[in-house]
Image (tube, rainbow, N blue to C red):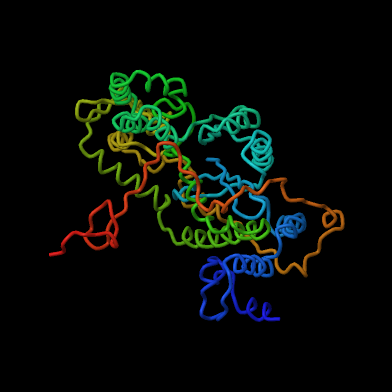
Amino acid sequence: MMQQPIVSGISDDHLEDTKLLKHSKAVCIQISYDKAWRAKELALGSIRGSPEESYNTLPSYCYVLEQKNLALVAVDGTFLKAKYLGTLFIAACKDGNNQIYPLAFGIGDSENDASWEWFLQKLHDALGHIDDLFVISDRHGSIEKAVHKVFPHARHGVCTYHVGQNLKTKFKNPAIHKLFHDAAMLIVSEFNFIFGQLEMIDPRAARYLMDIGVDRWARSYSTGKRYNIMTTGIVESLNAVLKNARDLPVLQLVEELRNLLQKWFVTRQQQAMSMSTELTMWADGELRSRYNMSATYLVEPINSKECNVNYAGISAQVNLDTRSCTCRQFDLDHIPCAHAIAACRFYNISCYTLCSKYFTTKALLSSYSECIYPTGNEIDWVVPNHIRDKVVLPPKTRRPTGRPRKVRIPSGGEGKRTSRCSRCGQYGHNRKTCKRPIP
């Protein structure tokens, strides 16, 4: 009798905490925790729909979504938190303004060989063959197998953050962790010195990194176009954005993704249209920073396009024809390094002409030239019978015992966060347990 008026006046956001529902003065009803929990589930079901209905409507939704929108790379997976659990697969890259650019999403039962191969095959079908493709991921065995099978010509690098966390767990030496991250980012001459120091401290750690493959984590030895992307942080950032959406039924999750992309595309399209520089804001700022660094570099010409550049006793050889430098930064970033900019100044060449076309404002506008359209009301969908008759069942999963996990499992080597007292500002305790005198 009273369920409908209560539910109709409560939004989705007010049903997240059962304790709030139990003790809510607005409801004015004394009920047990279990009854409050069941009431919350019923209310959410009436607002969001059932997970089973969500899977069943998915083929029609995808058909309408495809009709409304034209078919348009770090990869990773994150767990879902709805009734049937599952895994959300994500592939993303960065645009010319150093912003996250999602490429593809997929939903599967778990991170296994079959699921990753299916997802990457769908990604391959959408993108086709890409020269110099570089894929970055953690060292999940299923990802490595799928990348080598679906993209046999692609380079596969590993996330330096995850490798660093594994070093922490295995060798428990903060100095090794720091030296590894320094070595991963440095030029060849500096890499050899830093890696030599790491090897002296712990030969086992050096052997572990060599077994992974230096070309897979060190920029100076990378054999592909890795640019400045060393980690899967762009995917982890997307995971954080979608934290609450992962609790929704699958259809609402996909709609949340579509809505997010719609907002990003229109905002970034307007941002790109307002840029007056030849390069994007980020690339232009990066180039200016390197230009200032190059002011004191000394150039010794070798011929009309090659030269030797010296600074602080370290030299690098630049070839403007091949757009390369022995420091490897120019080769990897596709933006002139400080050595190349010094050479451009010496030969009176504009360094802007040596930047990759992907960093131009024109390319950025092209990236966001298409729009992401909504699917409209379900009642207005025109869906062929053969699509409507498709049956998509939820994955066969067994609900684990206990309270459902809402936060991710920390990675190996990830330290605990120390609490900070808001009363005295010291670490290791909170305001309630603070006993320090305040002057």
**Near-viewer residue (29 or 407):** 29
Above or below, 6 relative to 288? below
Residue 60 percent location from the top left of the image = 77, 58
Residue 4 percent location from the top left of the image = 68, 78
User: Of all residues shown, which one is farthest toward the left?
Assistant: 439
**Near-viewer residue (372 or 305):** 372
Question: In the drawing, does residue 198 fall left or right of residue 23?
Answer: left
Residue occupying image coordinates x 62% and y 68%: 35
Question: In the drawing, does residue 123 fall left or right of residue 204?
Answer: right
Above or below, 250 relative to 215? below
**Near-viewer residue (207 or 277):** 207
Residue occupying image coordinates x 32% and y 49%: 418
Residue 193 percent location from the top left of the image = 28, 22
Above or below, 115 relative to 223? below
Pick the quarter of the image with the N terminus. bottom right
Q: Quadrant of residue 343?
A: top left
- Residue 62 showing in the rendered view: yes
What number of labels is visible? 0
- Residue 305 showing in the rendered view: no
Residue occupying image coordinates x 77% and y 69%: 380
Above or below, 423 relative to 322? below
Residue 370 percent location from the top left of the image = 61, 57
Pick the quarter of the image with the C terminus. bottom left
